[in-house]
Image (cartoon, rainbow, N blue to C red):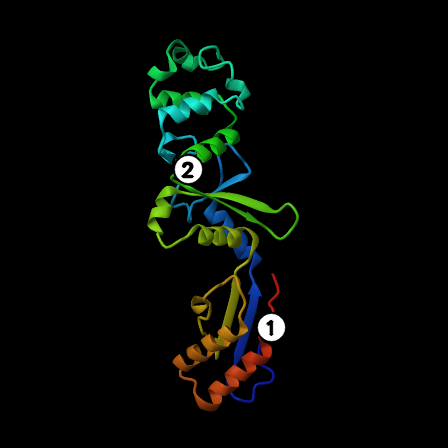
Amino acid sequence: MNNFDQSSSGINLDLTVFFDTNYSQTLFDDNMQRDNYNSELWHYTNYDQHSVTDLLSIDSYANVTKKALIDLIEDKSNLNLITGLFEFDAMQDCADYHNTYKSRLTKVQLWEYYTETSDYSEVVDKLCDTFSPKFLKVYSLGYSQGGSIECVIPEKLLSECPTMTPNKWKDLIHNLTFRAPLYVSLMIDGEDSAIDSHISDLYSYDKEELLEIIEKEAEGMGYVNDDLTYILEWCNDNLPEYPNHI
């Protein structure tokens, strides 16, 4: 939208506002990576600055005890382990475990046995329920039936962002997955007014906020009095009530 064919003020204005679905996909691709073993689980990498968390590593959990691990192995709900540590022979590389009493096994040996002889997703869920994950798992629903995402936030990133609460991480993942960021460009006499960088939430549209930003930017560019009034009135008339998704 521009005023090139109707402006009598001598000020040329060119306004573009939409939700950018192409950029949304780019942001998702740049920040999200599938789990190595569960294709329905994602990891937030923050522009590939963080690697995928190993959810089967003992280092990914706190408060791990031998007793809790033995209880997990002996849990009768784990039918593939009910015959016990000594009779299970599917793991050739762990054969020496079966000739040793559980109480004499190290914590690492118990961990390896449990994590390598059970279903991946079930094991991860059990580990998260039993111990204290150093990572964060967030779950968010989309807007269409069946649309959802489960995502892991890595331990290091959690420590780097202490002000981010679980709800804030959830909102971030929800926006990356299900929403598109706002694109706003206002050219005033061929000069970009840099509105995008001042919007408080690129995933929400607030016309009044945009007009306030435009006013400050136009003033900073030297437009005052009647010129400023014209810019604001024209933008108010031409900003959409709600932008399209493009």
Q: Residue 196's spot in the image, x, y percent?
A: 46, 67
- Residue lying at the far right in this picture: please name it: 145
Please name the residue shown 36% across and 27% down the image. 65
Image height check: is 122 above or below 104?
below
State which quarter of the image contains the N terminus.
bottom right
Q: Is residue 186 left or right of residue 100?
A: right
State which quarter of the image contains the C terminus.
bottom right
Q: Residue 73's spot in the image, x, y percent?
A: 46, 21
Please name the residue shown 35% across and 23% down the image. 108
In the picture, the disc for residue 53 is: 2
Q: In this view of the protein, which residue sits in the foreground, 212 or 24?
A: 212
Q: Mark 1: which amino acid?
A: Pro
Q: Mark 1 points at which residue?
A: 240
Whichever of labels 2 and 1 marks the residue nearer the N terminus, that label is 2
> For the residue carrying disc 2, how many other residues have a C-alpha within 10 Å: few (<14), some (14-19), or many (20+)?
some
Label 1 SS: loop
